[in-house]
């Protein structure tokens, strides 16, 4: 495991950089002897919706795409037009694709039961992450988690299909709508990144086998909330400053996470007085990124537990999140007064 920033391996030995996402999914399907192609198709459905949302984000400055939608979601947050557009686009692609039986979305109060009894998969999704940055043209994203249903196919969906701990994910990923658009995902066999080629309408493998550096020079936290942090977070951030780490905070979780994944760093959204359980949502923000970071050799915790071990008990439950390079997250946990932090995971 190295501590150097991620360097894309362009050697011919690697899954040849430049192959399309479709081709890569097909090649990787071979890794799963009992694969039936349904998960592959579901990943393609997500990529299709990402291409459509990418087109919309590029036009976010135009009146009919940018700005507030004039409604609030179940979190009391004002929905942006692009939140609603992305939500509709992903739900449509997932329901038309035929592989999904239920969807949990940040923008929907309740579970969307697609009445598709042959669908094997449950998807939890944050259709548009970083909504506060839409109108100011800063990178935004989409986050998704995929689970296999627990109840038998053909039966109505049950609570146990939805409320699964993160370690039950069969795939997870995010789309970053930034200077370029990227799709990064894992199926539990490493993490790979694909860059979107607009003129060809294709995602191409650009970042094979991403590994998070063990250490990093970057910490990402909303310092405006410092007065609400618990002492352990205050002392850790103080340590980061004395060790001359760089403070970088975009305010879009996907963008902050992606930078730290490649360069090495830690993102923290701890519990605060206003949000004692943190701000970020377990099912469609924390779980997906925790699966990715662990597959890349990093760590994700709520300050006490491994994120992927947290048993969900409500759709939109929040969790504190400390995520990133292994040694930095370890350091943060030690500062949170957990003596002798034994990272059993
Ligand atoms: O403005 P704050 O309190 O720093 O919160 C920023 C965080 O909230 C989020 O915007 C929440 O996600 P949504 O935009 O999907 O609601 C994260 O992307 C981001 O990291
Ligand atoms: Mg979000
Ligand atoms: Mg969102």
Image (cartoon, helix red, strand yellow):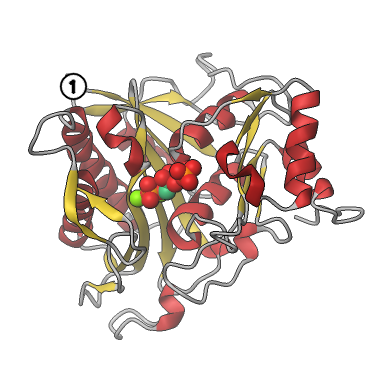
Find residue 92 and report its image quarter.
bottom left
Percent coordinates x, y for residue 288 in the rendering: 49, 52
Q: Quadrant of the N terminus?
A: top right
The residue tagged 1 is: 200
Count up the numbered dots. Answer: 1
As displayed, is residue 130 above or below residue 337? above
Residue at 54 percent of width and 60 percent of height: 275
Q: Is residue 74 visible?
A: yes
As displayed, is residue 163 above or below residue 106? below
Percent coordinates x, y for residue 300 in the rendering: 64, 49
As displayed, is residue 327 above or below residue 46? above
Residue at 34 percent of width and 28 percent of height: 138
Q: Please state which of residues 24 and 180 is positioned toward the viewer in this rendering.
A: 180
Q: Quadrant of the C terminus?
A: bottom right
Percent coordinates x, y for residue 248 in the rendering: 56, 26
Name the side, left or right, on which 13 lies relative to 326: left
Residue at 28 percent of width and 47 percent of height: 46
The 10 Å Cα crowd at callout 1, few under 14, some 14 to 19, many 20 or more, is few
Q: Residue furthest front?
A: 227
Q: Please state which of residues 104 and 231 is positioned toward the viewer in this rendering.
A: 231
Percent coordinates x, y for residue 67 in the rendering: 18, 40
Name the side, left or right, on which 46 lies relative to 188: left
Q: Please state which of residues 301 and 279 is positioned toward the viewer in this rendering.
A: 279
Name the side, left or right, on which 253 lies relative to 340: left
**Does any atom of ligand 3 lie closer than 8 Å to the CB of label 1?**
no
- Classify mark 1: helix, strand or loop: loop
Find residue 97 and report its image quarter.
bottom left
Find residue 139 and report its image quarter.
top left
Name the side, left or right, on which 209 lies relative to 172: right
Q: Is residue 143 visible?
A: no
């Amino acid at each position: 495991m190295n501590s150097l920033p991620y360097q894309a391996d362009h050697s011919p030995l690697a899954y040849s950089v430049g192959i399309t996402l479709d081709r890569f999914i097909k090649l990787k399907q071979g890794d799963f002897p009992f694969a039936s192609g349904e998960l592959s198709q579901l990943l393609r459905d997500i990529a299709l919706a990402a291409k459509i949302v990418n087109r919309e984000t590029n036009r976010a400055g135009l009146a009919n795409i940018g700005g507030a939608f004039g409604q609030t979601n179940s979190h009391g947050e004002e929905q942006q037009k692009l939140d609603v557009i992305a939500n509709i686009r992903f739900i449509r692609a997932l329901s038309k694709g035929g592989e999904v039986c239920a969807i949990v979305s940040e923008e929907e109060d309740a579970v969307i039961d697609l009445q598709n009894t042959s669908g094997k998969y449950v998807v939890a999704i944050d259709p548009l992450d970083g909504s506060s940055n839409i109108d100011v043209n800063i990178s935004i994203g989409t986050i998704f988690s995929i689970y296999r249903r627990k109840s038998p196919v053909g039966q109505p969906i049950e609570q146990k299909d939805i409320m699964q701990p993160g370690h039950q994910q069969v795939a997870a990923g995010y789309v970053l709508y930034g200077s370029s658009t990227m799709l990064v995902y894992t199926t539990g066999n490493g993490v790979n990144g694909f860059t979107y080629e607009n003129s060809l309408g294709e995602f191409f493998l650009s970042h094979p086998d991403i590994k998070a550096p063990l250490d990093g020079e970057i910490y990402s936290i909303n310092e405006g909330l410092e007065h609400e942090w618990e002492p352990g977070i205050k002392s850790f951030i103080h340590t980061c400053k004395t060790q001359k780490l760089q403070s970088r905070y975009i305010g879009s979780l996907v963008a902050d996470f992606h930078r730290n994944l490649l360069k090495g760093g830690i993102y923290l959204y701890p519990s605060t007085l206003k949000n004692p359980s943190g701000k970020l949502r377990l099912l469609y923000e924390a779980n997906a990124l925790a699966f990715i970071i662990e597959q890349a050799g990093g760590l994700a915790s709520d300050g006490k537990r491994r994120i992927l071990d947290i048993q969900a008990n409500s759709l939109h439950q929040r969790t504190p999140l400390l995520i990133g390079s292994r040694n930095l997250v370890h350091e943060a946990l030690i500062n949170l007064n957990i003596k002798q932090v034994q990272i059993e995971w």
